[in-house]
Structure formats: structure tokens, C-alpha cells
Amino acid sequence: MDQAVSRAALENGFFSHDGARLFYRHWPVHAGQQDSGRVIVLLHRGHEHSGRVQQLVDALVPADTAAYAWDARGHGYSHGKRGDAPDFMCLVRDFEAFIQHLQNTHGCRQEQILVIANSVGAVIAATWIHDYAPRVRGLVMAASAFDINLYVPLAKPALRLGLRLQPELNVTSYVRASMLTHCEAEAKSYDTDPLVTKNISARVLIDLADTAQRVVADAAAIDLPVLMLVAGKDYVVKTGAQKAFYDKIRSALKRWVYLPEAHHALLYEKDTSVAFSEIRTFIKECFALPEHSFEKHIAPQAAAQREPGLQDLPAPGLADSIAFGMQRFMMRHLGWLSEGITLGIQTGFDSGASLDYVYRNRASGKLGIGALIDRGYLDAIGWRGIRERKQHLEKMLAAAIAAVPAGQTIRILDLATGGGRYVLETVKRFGDRQFDIELRDYVQANLDAAAALANQLGLADSVQCRRCDAFSADSYQEAQRFDIVVISGLFELFSDNALLSTALQGVRRQMQPGAKLIYTGQPWHPQLAMIAHTLTNHQGKPWVMRPRPQAELDALVAMAGGRKLQSLVGIQGIFSVSLAEFATP
């Protein structure tokens, strides 16, 4: 690998997921060098911008490697109120849009990208890797802001309260330049930089804390190479959360480098020799590794032939046991007042009928108070995520339909349709197109509901309902060729990867070359224990989920012949909707 050299940046911009225009800098391969195809993407610290990573590009990026760095939303030259964003996850979605832009516009291959991220940027990168499961080479994390030192007692509860009273509340950073680095020149540069913003939205700050907490808790889902650089005299972020993250990640190549005298801005310290040497070595090691291997993402425990039970969850503590017992008591004695809870008890809270009720989102109950109970039920974080998943699925399905050439009958298969609402309501919006739709499900009541909805929407002539088992190879014997296949809300219910592989191999045989697969996942859930101890599934058993990391789900699709094109991630990263292409049947 060639030695790093100084080079000038080109300036550009891209439209993010919501149409916001964000600014970025691009350092092409040095003149006279053969392009290796390798790419390094740098994420700046909070308050800063891409102009401040020029020295990192000069010191760390080899001459045969391109580099890119953005100004995060609300920073530098990018769109938005200074230091603000709708929420922290908006920044993560911005980064996914940035990577998509680099792939589509600059021809960057995801498998040849390595990310170097600092402070808040490191949390953006870690969340992106956890939620979107990109096939990048590796990640360098410097002074990761998983747990920010706020110093003021009860600062987080106070900020949460303040946001209720003033939703646009901002916080001014207490950090002085001398707390960031021992280097006087760097401190002066920071203090005099007109594009450095000292403000940060309290909303983003709190959402950052919540997101960091879940990513650290579920860090075992990450198994790509990671280098963590940690400052010994960091007055801005705490070391404990960084160590917890490092200990949990399952990376075969991971390294912890502790710099005892460094302040928070450890990449801008008076002495960066150790940090830079470690990064250069790590870059070489990552690019020397073979490209992404899908098989490594298949967790051994996922091959179990039985469904998970309560015995697979940690035993609840005394407080949780009391809380779960009270919830069971309330559901047993007051649940009948709520239409949604009653339906869940009768058919299973994971049933197609129950989900269709959640999609409609109209509270209903008995004796007046029942509707209030039902509203609380429908507003649970998981059900809000389900409704957002439906929106993402409809958006992705509409795009896939629009991509089919005009004049061609569009053949759609929904593998576990439930009530068929998301497919049928989306298709209804394309009145000028011809469709041939097959809705499959294992439960006849679901098919009856789907047929009734198709008739209500005037689509009965285009829809065939078929009862079959998605996990039986016999369901895929006919020589059919679908343009779009939807698998929604199915894989989340089963832990056995052999079942999923049977379904994926089956639909692959029934897809046109270039057909699209839209599939949903549930990488994690914040209420696993509560749901398992209080709700029942469609089989009348405790509803015990085995969340499947996005990387594992994508690997199963890839091993069946699919290539993931994009993902949309919902509230708190609970649900995902992804699009894959199958080049050949």
C-alpha cells in the first residue's frame, strides 16, 4: 500500500433520505497513482465539519485510495439548524444515504469501504453498522461518544423534562478547546474556526444517549473488524461504555488501544504517533482480508430445531416478576374491555388478524374506558414500529412496482400475507397497471380476510388466494415466475434458519431474472422479556422472540442468491424492511 500524501479536496453535495442537501468533500486518488478501488470515509466529531479532517486524510489515507467526508446535518455547510436534526437516527439515515450516493455516483464498492469515525461520528457509524449491516471492510472508532459526561446531576432527566416544555431546546457545549487536546495549535484552530458550532439540540443529545445504549447492549450483532482508540484523560465521554461495546462485538479482528495521556480529540493531540500508527496498520490488515463472507454471519444457535422458550431468556428479577404478574392480571381481568387485546388473546398477538388490527390503528373497546386501554395498547413501541414497518414496506413495494417496464403485467407473490393489506392497498394506487397477485398463507381465516379486502378494493380479478406452508418445499413446485416477492412479518417469528432457507430457496425458483425480494426483519426489541412473560403467540404459547441480526438475515438472503440493495430501518431499530435482487432463478 502506497504511502499517504497530501492532496486537495473537491467539494460536492447529495440529497439525503428526506431531500435535505448535505455537503461533502472528496479526495480523489493522487495524480499518477493507480486507483486501487479502496475508499476511506471519515466522520467528524460533534460540533465540527469535514474541513477539519484534511490532516487526517493527509496522514492516514494512502495515495491509491479515495477519501470522502461529509458535513453532518446541521454542521458546516450542510442543511439544517446548527447542531440540530429531527433526531439522532436521522443522522444515521443520512449516513446510509451518503454511502448509497457514493456507490451510485462515484462507483464505490461497499466491500472496499473502511470508515474512520470520531466521537459522535463513531456512534453514528456503529449504529449504521448495527442497523443496516453493510459489508464494509472495517471501522476505526476514536473516543466513541457512547456515554457523554454531562457532569450536572440528573442532567438527562432534566433534559427530558425540558424537551417536554420546550421541544426546540438547545444545549451549549461546556467543552473548552484545552479539554480536547494538549496541542495549542489545534486548540486555537478549533476556537477560531467559524464553522464549528457549540450548540447541540437537546433532542439529539438525548436520542444519542438512548441509541448508544441499545447499540452497546446489542453489540454482539457486530462482527466486522473494529479498532477502538480510547483516551485516558477524556473529559467528554466515559470509558466504561466503550469497553462494554468492545467486549461484546464478535469481530475476529478487533483491537483496543488505550492512550493514557490523550484528551478527547485524540486524533488531534500533540502526539498522535501511536494512534496514527495503529490506524495505518489496521487499514492494511483490513484491506488484506478476503472480501465479505456471508457464512460467518449465521449464528450457530440459530440452527436449533426448536423454537425458543422462556427458558432461553434471562430469569426476571423481583421487580420485573412483579410487573409482569401485574400485567398478566390486568390483561386477564380488564383486557376484555380492549378490542385489540381481546383479539390478541383469541388469535395470538402475532397473528395476521392482530397485526391487521394494529395497522388500522383505531382504538375501540367497551364501557368507555376500553377505548382508552386500547389506545395505550396500540401506542406501544412495538406496534408503532409495526405501523412504520408497513409504511416502509409500502414505499419499497411502490418503488419496485414502478420499476417494472410499462405495459408488462406485474406478478407479485406475498408469501405470508396475513390480511394482505399492505400489498393490496399499495397495488390499488397503480390503477393504470395490470397485476397478477398471489397471496399465500397457512391460515384460512387470513386468506378469507385478504380475499374480502381485495373484493372491497375492486382487485378480486387480479388476486388469487392460496393456502400453503411457506416452509414446505412442496409449496414451490409449480413453474411460476414472479417479478416481486414479499416476505413480511414471517421470518421474525421463527428461529430455525433451515426453515428460512427452505422458503428463500423456494421463492428463488419462482422468480424472474432480476426479480426483487422485499423482506422484513426484527434485529432487536426493547421489550423481549415483557412480551414473552405476558403475551401469547398464534400457537397459544408464550410469545418468545429470537431477534435475528440484520447481518444474519441478509446473509440468508445472499446464500439463496440475492443481493441486498437497500434497507429502511424504523423506530429504535426494532424493524427493518430490505430490498434484494435475484439475478437468476
Image (cartoon, rainbow, N blue to C red):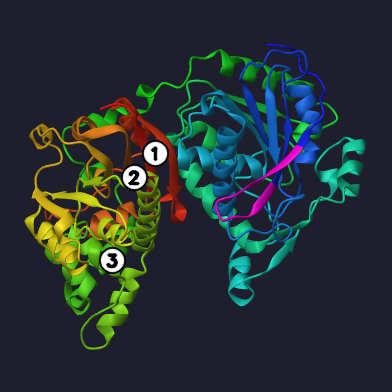
Nearest the camera: 159 or 106? 106
Q: Mark 3 sits on what residue?
A: 358
Task: Quadrant for residue 145, please give it.
Answer: top right
For label 1, count other residues whose C-alpha is less than 10 Å away and answer few (under 14), some (14-19) or many (20+).
many
For label 2, count other residues whose C-alpha is less than 10 Å away and answer few (under 14), some (14-19) or many (20+).
many
Q: Position of residue 409 (x, y in %)?
A: 25, 46
For the record, the magenta segment spans: 11-22
Quarter of the C terminus within the rendering:
top left
Compute the Cα span from label 3 to label 2. Answer: 18 Å
Between discs 1 and 3, the one toward the N terminus: 3
- The kind of secondary structure element at disc 2 is strand
Q: Position of residue 345 (x, y in %)?
A: 16, 65
- Labelled disc at residue 521: 2
Could you tell me if residue 262 is visible in this image?
A: no
Amino acid type of disc 2?
Gly
Between discs 2 and 1, the one toward the N terminus: 2
Residue 401 lies, with reference to residue 368, above or below; the image says above
Q: Position of residue 185 (x, y in %)?
A: 92, 36
Amino acid type of disc 3?
Val
Q: Is mark 2 in CB contact (under 8 Å) with mark 1?
A: yes
Quarter of the N terminus within the rendering:
top right
Q: How many marks?
A: 3
Between discs 3 and 2, the one toward the N terminus: 3
Could you tell me if residue 132 is visible in this image?
A: yes
